Amino acid sequence: MVVIIGWPLSHSLSPLMQNTAFMAAGLHDWYYIPISVPKYPSTRIKEAILGLRALNFRGANITIPHKEVILPFLDHIHETAQNIGAVNTILIDDEKLIGYNTDGIGFIKDLIENKIDPQHKKILILGAGGSTRAILYALLDHGCDDITILNRTIAKAEDLVKQFKPRFPKASIDSGNLSDASCIKADLIINTTSVGMNDDLYPINMSFSPEQIVYDIIYQPRMTPLLTKAQHDGAKVINGLGMLLYQGAEAFSIWTGKKADIDMMKKCLYPI
Ligand code: ATR
């Protein structure tokens, strides 16, 4: 049994995708279920994570807004997740809760699938949460050396620069306010904020040109206001379905020890 824990979860395609992958692998007694755990009261997420062992779960996915706060509740954190500072996948093995992060690899694999080489590109990241950490680390580890991070709460973007700069001293990593997004020229713009997932007033006001690539890690809706504007302006647009797919395939292997059937997972994410 595997669970996805987050808030909100109603939009999540992970249960459909992972249950399809379990079936395709002949794992007929495996189930992937969503359980909503809100951010407040803040004690709830600790109770939920520690409860995984008692409830005999094999694994979990952790999503917005819990990817960073759960680290202290785990018994061991895999090196990549340690470097990132966020966990999106938990394996419960031999009574131990082990934290992994598959978001970064999922993101890079999707860039490759889209024939995008992020190296030598000027990159703008919108957001500074748990997903940002994974994407930022993956890009820096991939050799990207010109990245600006903008966030509504500037202090969080500044903290990311402080944490990652010493590990990648040759890279230029800058921070700033989300409201300045329109002032920055970049080749690749990546939205990691949750804005665009619902009908809230959209705080990002940008214009694009055809040479630019705009990647939004949101997949529900498929076209966020950011992607709609970028497409209208002629930029290449990519939504979060591919990253969902590849991070999920990595997590599947961690729990089951088997290779995921990517084609079957794709079929349920991209029905004709
Ligand atoms: P995840 O783990 O998916 O990254 P998170 O850590 O909760 O989720 O991060 C959510 C991101 O969306 C943050 O960058 C957050 O900005 P703040 O750090 O200022 O909270 C951003 N975000 C959420 N709602 C937003 C809004 N209405 N306007 C702008 N940014 C928003």
Image (cartoon, grey):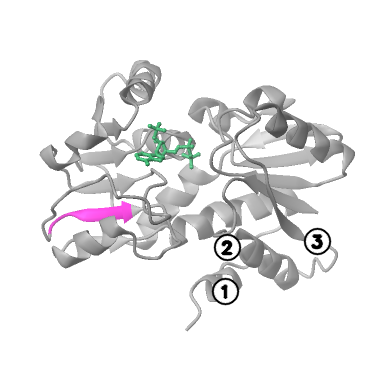
The magenta segment is: 211-215
Quadrant position of ligand 1? top left
Q: In screen coordinates, is 83 left or right of 258?
A: left
Q: Main secondary structure of the magenta part?
A: strand
| Residue underneath mark 3 | 30
- Front tag of 3 and 2: 2
Residues at marks 1 and 3 touching, judged by CB atoms closer than 8 Å: no
Quarter of image, res 98: top right
Which residue is depicted at the point 14% across and 42% down? 182
| Residue underneath mark 2 | 13
For residue 175, above or below residue 257: above
Give the CA distance from mark 3 to mark 2.
17 Å
User: Mark 3: is the Cβ under 8 angstroms from ligand 1?
Assistant: no
Q: Amino acid at mark 1?
A: Cys
Which residue is depicted at the point 73% across and 57% down? 33
| Residue underneath mark 1 | 268
Residues 107 and 219: in front is: 219
Image coords of residue 140 (percent x, y):
35, 33
